[in-house]
Image (cartoon, rainbow, N blue to C red):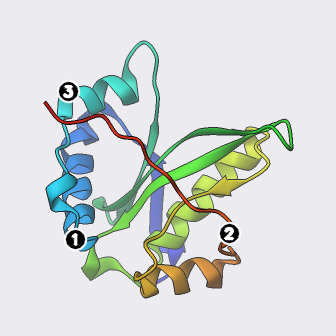
Amino acid sequence: MSSADIRVRAAERGDVPFIVECIRALAAYEKLTQECAPDSARLTEHLFGERPYVEALIAERDGRKVGYALVFYSYSTFLTAPGIFLEDLFVFPEERGRGAGKALLDAVVDMARERGCERVEWSVLDWNEPAIRFYEAYGARPQDAWTVYRLARKPG
């Protein structure tokens, strides 16, 4: 099977339960379930509300949903150009290595190109060797000079 067997499409409201399922599965894979508390109503608002903050793509094989990608715009002041940040790219384990991840990443790159974005960026956990190999085989390179910082809202 190849990415030619995969259909990638924009997410619709009815896909929100699937996206939440993917988010939970991704959190489990990344050993971050303690940080994962997706809210379907908020996700729906952020995807499809008056002011969308994110966009999602769904990968399907034979009409079955097998993965998703979630993106939002970023901006480079150095390039004075928009970019796309790939927040999540997730394919269910039984579908990995069968083209869905590549099809999703191709769709994100195409989206960036069509919208005049200068780059696509994302983060990957340093222990996630399968993802690192996948991204490097695609042609992406790590940005080792940067350290990610986070300031998060406290729960409650």
Q: Earlier in the sequence, mark 2 or mark 3?
A: 3
Q: Residue at x 20, y 42 (%)?
A: 38
Q: Which residue is mark 2?
A: 143
Which amino acid type is shown beneath numbered disc 3?
Answer: Ala
Mark 2 → mark 1, Cα distance in angstroms: 23 Å
Q: Any mark on residue 31, and which? A: 1
- Disc 1 is placed on an element classified as loop
Residue at 25% x, 57% y: name it.
22
Q: In the figure, is residue 58 to the left or right of 110?
A: left
Residue 12 seen from this side: yes
Q: Secondary structure at mark 2?
A: loop
- Image location (x, y in percent) of residue 74: 64, 39
Amino acid at dot 1: Lys
Q: Is residue 48 above or below residue 2?
A: above
Residue of label 3: 41
Residue 152 locus on image (x, y percent): 35, 40
